[in-house]
């Protein structure tokens, strides 16, 4: 988790696919840039983006979403699945009358953003993936071991946390049980990621939960790291890779450096061919 919980901005609820989902709108409504959908990491909510949210909202419309069972979004009697959450995000975008948007997800939310791009490519112009692997086994072994032990007991300790005051209606034991079950499910999205047509930017900490070798492998799936770009840059891929120095998986969003890195990528007006 990153950022310090703060008071919510006035938000909205929409019912999509049977889920009452909470979202907030930030930034200028009249912006000519495509809206940017922000998808947070596990356990927390919109507040996880910390100072990056207002920084990104300076010149563009932001749609910040609380994912299923998180924050102020409903908890349904079903397991958490990346695919279902992706369908819900796509349905929300459609509900808001938006044809094309940029997506930016962190950790759990990055997995949802990837699946949204895979399953609903027509609505995604550009994608930013922050601190998430392309397959489960790409995490460090100690991270996978922590997933193996994630369950209701860990959630019970959240009742004394600042997040419990921010989200008093969340059943923390149930949420940790559902996230733990999701985190233990194996997946490998290599084939689907290699087919993504929208430009993708990967952002990782230099001491992330994923080894640098796996980060390079992810970049390679997107066409990156295949050779020298040349003096004129003609050989560079559409994908971009950023490594945040002096950061970890857990504090990468605590400053505005991510917003500063991704802003030029998001500001590009065209869908760059891969």
Image: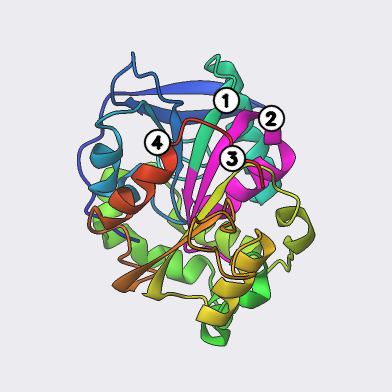
Q: CA distance from mark 3 to mark 1?
A: 15 Å
Q: Residues under labels 2 and 4: Cα distance?
A: 19 Å
Residue at x 30%, y 59% (from the top left corner): 2
Q: CA distance from mark 2 to mark 1?
A: 7 Å
| Local secondary structure at mark 4 | helix
User: Secondary structure under badge 1?
Assistant: loop
Segment colored magenta? 104-133
Badge 2 density bin: few <14, some 14–19, many ≥20, Cα 10 Å: some
On whether residue 209 falls in the magenta region, the answer is: no
Q: Label 3: state its secondary structure.
A: loop
User: At 24% from the left edge and 38% from the top edge, which residue is drawn?
Assistant: 54
Residue 236 drawn above or below residue 5: below
Q: CA distance from mark 4 to mark 1?
A: 14 Å
Q: Residue at x 73, y 65 (%)?
A: 187
Q: Which label lies toward us, 4 or 1?
A: 4
Q: Identify which residue, 54 or 175, lies in the foreground.
A: 54
Q: Which label number is shown at residue 272?
A: 3
Q: Is residue 211 above or below residue 34?
A: below
Q: Which residue is mark 1?
A: 100
Does residue 109 belong to the magenta stretch? yes
The x and y percentages for residue 111 are 59, 54
Instruction: Report x, y in % for residue 205.
Output: 38, 70
Quadrant containing the N terminus is: bottom left
Residues at marks 2 and 1 touching, judged by CB atoms closer than 8 Å: yes
Mark 4 and mark 3 residues within 8 Å of each other at the beta carbon: no
10 Å crowding of disc 4: few (<14), some (14-19), many (20+): few
In the displayed structure image, the side of residue 158 where residue 254 appears, left or right: left
In the rendered image, which residue does mark 2 sit on? 122
The tag earlier along the polypeptide, 4 or 3, is: 4
**Between 204 and 181, the one nearer to me in the picture:** 204
């Amino acid at each position: 988790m990153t950022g310090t919980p703060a008071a919510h901005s006035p938000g909205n609820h929409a019912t999509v696919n049977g889920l009452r989902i909470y979202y907030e709108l930030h930034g200028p409504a009249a912006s000519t840039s495509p809206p940017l959908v922000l998808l947070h990491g596990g356990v927390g909510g919109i507040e996880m983006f910390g100072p990056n949210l207002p920084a990104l909202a300076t010149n563009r419309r932001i749609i910040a979403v609380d994912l299923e069972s998180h924050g102020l979004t409903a908890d349904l009697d079903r397991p958490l699945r990346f695919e279902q959450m992706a369908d819900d995000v796509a349905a929300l975008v459609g509900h808001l009358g938006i044809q094309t948007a940029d997506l930016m997800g962190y950790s759990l939310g990055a997995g949802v953003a990837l699946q949204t791009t895979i399953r609903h490519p027509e609505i995604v112009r550009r994608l930013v993936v922050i601190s998430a692997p392309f397959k489960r086994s790409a995490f460090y072994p100690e991270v996978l071991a922590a997933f193996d032990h994630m369950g209701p007991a860990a959630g019970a300790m959240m009742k004394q946390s600042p997040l419990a005051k921010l989200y008093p209606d969340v059943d923390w034991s149930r949420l940790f049980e559902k996230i733990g079950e999701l985190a233990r499910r194996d997946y490998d999205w290599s084939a689907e990621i290699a087919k993504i047509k929208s430009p993708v930017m990967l952002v990782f900490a230099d001491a992330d939960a994923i080894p640098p070798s796996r980060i390079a492998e992810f970049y390679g799936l997107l066409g990156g790291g295949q050779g020298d770009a040349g003096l004129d840059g003609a050989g560079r891929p559409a994908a971009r890779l950023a490594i945040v120095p002096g950061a970890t998986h857990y504090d990468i969003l605590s400053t505005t450096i991510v917003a500063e890195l991704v802003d030029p990528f998001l500001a590009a007006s065209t869908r760059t061919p891969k």
